[in-house]
Image (cartoon, rainbow, N blue to C red):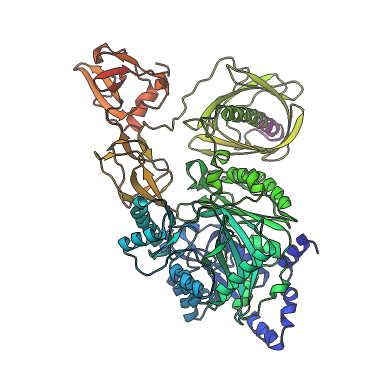
Amino acid sequence: MPITSMIHRNLRRSSSKRFNYTQSRSSSAATNNEKSNRKIDKLLIANRGEIACRIMRTAKRLGIQTVAVYSDADRHSLHVKSADEAVRIGPPPARSSYLNASSIIEAAVRTGAQAIHPGYGFLSENADFAQLCENEGFTFVGPPASAIREMGDKSASKRIMGAAGVPLVPGYHGHEQDINIMKSEADKIGYPILIKPTHGGGGKGMRIVQSPKDFVDSFLGAQREAAASFGVNTILLEKYITRPRHIEVQIFGDKQGNVVYLYERDCSVQRRHQKIIEEAPAPDIISDFRTRLGQAAISAAQAVGYHNAGTVEFIVDTLSGEFYFMEMNTRLQVEHPVTEMIVGQDLVEWQIRVANGESLPLDQAQIPLSGHAFEARIYAENVPRGFLPATGVLHYFHPIPASASVRVETGVEEGDTVSMHYDPMIAKLVVWGENRAAALIKLKDSLLKFQVAGLPTNIEFLYKLANHRAFANGELETHFIDQFKDDLFVTPKDSAEAEKAYDAAKHSAALVGACICEKERTRLNKSPPGGLSMWYTHPPFRLNHHATRKIELEWENEYHDNNSEHLTLSISHLPNGNYLIKMGESSVSYLEATVTHLGDHDFRVEADGLSKNVNLASYLTDQTEHIHIWHGSNHHQFKQKVGLDLLDNLETDHHRNRESASHPPGTVVAPMAGLVVKVLVKDGMKVEEGQPMLVMEAMKMEHVIKAPTSGIVSGLQVAPGQQVSDNSVLFNVKKEGAESLVVIWRNSEGLGGDEVSSGGCGVCGGCRGGVDAAPTMMEAVSIRCCDTMVQFLLDACQWDPPIRDPPSYLIFLHLGSTVYNHRYSAEI
């Protein structure tokens, strides 16, 4: 049977047909199954987002009513809308809602649920919660509390695995947590060392320590992050394997003592110790190695009397070929869909049936292995900023349509907000192919068609990963991203790469202009006056007239210091219905395009002899229109101020002030929205470049903010416990003896001056080429501030001028006893 048919059968067929073979095992098993099928009529999912929606889908197919729980932040979320009932359990912070066990139990009592499914994360690996469910008479859809407790304590699990004959990495798994003893144990093991919380998962709290001098800070940081994420701050140490692969085995056990493995997944491609692409089966694995991995995983499960879904994770040393037990995740994994795709089974259904007391539906010999599957995790995150989590509104959310070989697992929909309170994953893209090469082609194609606008995502980075030759060859290690960073990340200093990107952006901008004009032309032809769409931010040009519009766009990119570049377009509507787009002003190029408006966001464009589909999305924030365009393998983002006049036959240039996101040199801003956990410096303190300055926490991950340069701390704006927004000013590091920005004014009382910031103003960039020296302040050539500069001084530099009206402000760079005129390129 083709795999697509098998997947469709197993994920869509009624449960009675799928499990007929289970009843043939024995008459007693059949009786137990009949009883347990009536046991769970209502299931509460103690989770949110994607996994809650995933569990509900299977439960509803089995005829089970579902109950959602939600925090105030999730009141209107997709998992709440998808449930038969939903119960509020608290405010947004997880500790007050999704980690509040008593509130979840109360919700189950209130709604009459018989069972509780924990999903993954939150309370899914909390042994006390599992025990509480059983004590209160609820079926816990997961392993026994004893197994969670034994395997959840990574130190204890290492001892149990050692006794069961499962290979272990050298390390320290003892109870003693004194920092001096731990440091001594690290010295015995030998560096590099992996510091790891004994509880939890997801890479939270993990630190790689290369030398003894970094041990203390890393150890304390790991403890803090573990306490914040899991409520337990105990740590274990392991020898860090320098060239590892991360391979895990999906196991399943029932309450009759049967345990099987459903093959392995390779999860080596990670960032911040968290998986972003998983695949099954693992590439370049021979049958004998697969069997040994599977048997070791079964031994691990049997050692703790395990039942239900679990994953045994191994670290594979690529140099020696040996594998070692890493940990066991006593829950359903995020990446379980790739296993479902290659075995054609619904693992959530298995979970529910096993929790009901049924036997496993398949023996080991019956479990198929067919084809290959990938999962790519779509995150709201800022890749250029080191994959920091991002927050914002999903103004446009168009995943690729699902099919028998493509799945999209998500818990969000267009218009939802990704908040700082929870994990930033917005979707999982899962694809299947007859072999790895076919699956990889489908993965790349699906990523190109996965369209999101409103906040930064990692989609383009995932596409780069999938296209990398080493990934295509299956040459995977956990250092993959760092190993190939030059290929995967933008290099701003690469002028050839930047020029190529600029040319592609100009072409996309031309398509944007032509499509917007055609959309408005179509709209005006079809609609009565006044019925204009969200695209209509400009007056119309005359139809059937050789009209010209001028459009100014900002291309948002990673190649320039201010992350944007100005593009000017002049668009003429020709008598033949085509559009002639003039790109640029000093260096001019032209493109003639035929545009067909297919739908709200969809266009067909023919240009340069090539016809292709083009998709546009637009949304407004703070008087700025953001425009995204997708065509072929290209995705570009532009923005423009709302309300600019785009006039017919525009003969004169239209200039406008553009908002600058620059800050004075030495200013350190928050790389993401989050909580200030610890401030390590104070005003006036001397610091060295790279020295930790403060610690922030966002989505349960700690981020250390370091000094950008050596100098003196000034203008400290934050304190521990303070919530800060993305890009808000934290502090300034002023170089000793470096230039500073000085404002000079003259009034009736004479000449005065203020030093307002270090470095240049950052507004115009005019001082990049140097400064004109003057021996004394009085001999310096003065210039007059424009309104933009004055506003910058008042806002960004937080300057409080002694006089405001009507001074003539003069700007200088001050270096020691010498004063320099600041070259200002704006209109004076």
Q: Is residue 216 above or below residue 693?
A: below
Q: Is residue 96 visible?
A: no
Q: Is residue 782 above or below residue 688?
A: above
Is 93 contained in the magenta span?
Answer: no
Left or right: residue 483 compared with residue 209: right
Left or right: residue 438 compared with residue 454: right
The magenta region covers 517-529
Is 523 contained in the magenta span?
Answer: yes
Q: Work out whether residue 443 or residue 75 is closer to the camera in this orientation and state it.
A: 443
Q: Work out whether residue 779 or residue 217 is closer to the camera in this orientation and state it.
A: 217
Position of the C terminus by quadrant: top left
Q: Residue at x 57, y 69 (%)?
A: 310
Q: Residue at x 52, y 54 (%)?
A: 274
Name the residue at the bottom extreme. Answer: 28
Measured from the top left, where is residue 486 in percent x and y? Answer: 55, 38
Q: Which SS type dominates the magenta stretch?
A: helix
Name the residue at the left extreme. Answer: 749
Measured from the top left, where is residue 47 in percent x and y? Answer: 52, 64
Rendering quarter of residue 597? top right
Rendering quarter of residue 795? top left
Measured from the top left, where is residue 162 in percent x and y? Answer: 50, 72
Q: Residue at x 67, y 46 (%)?
A: 444
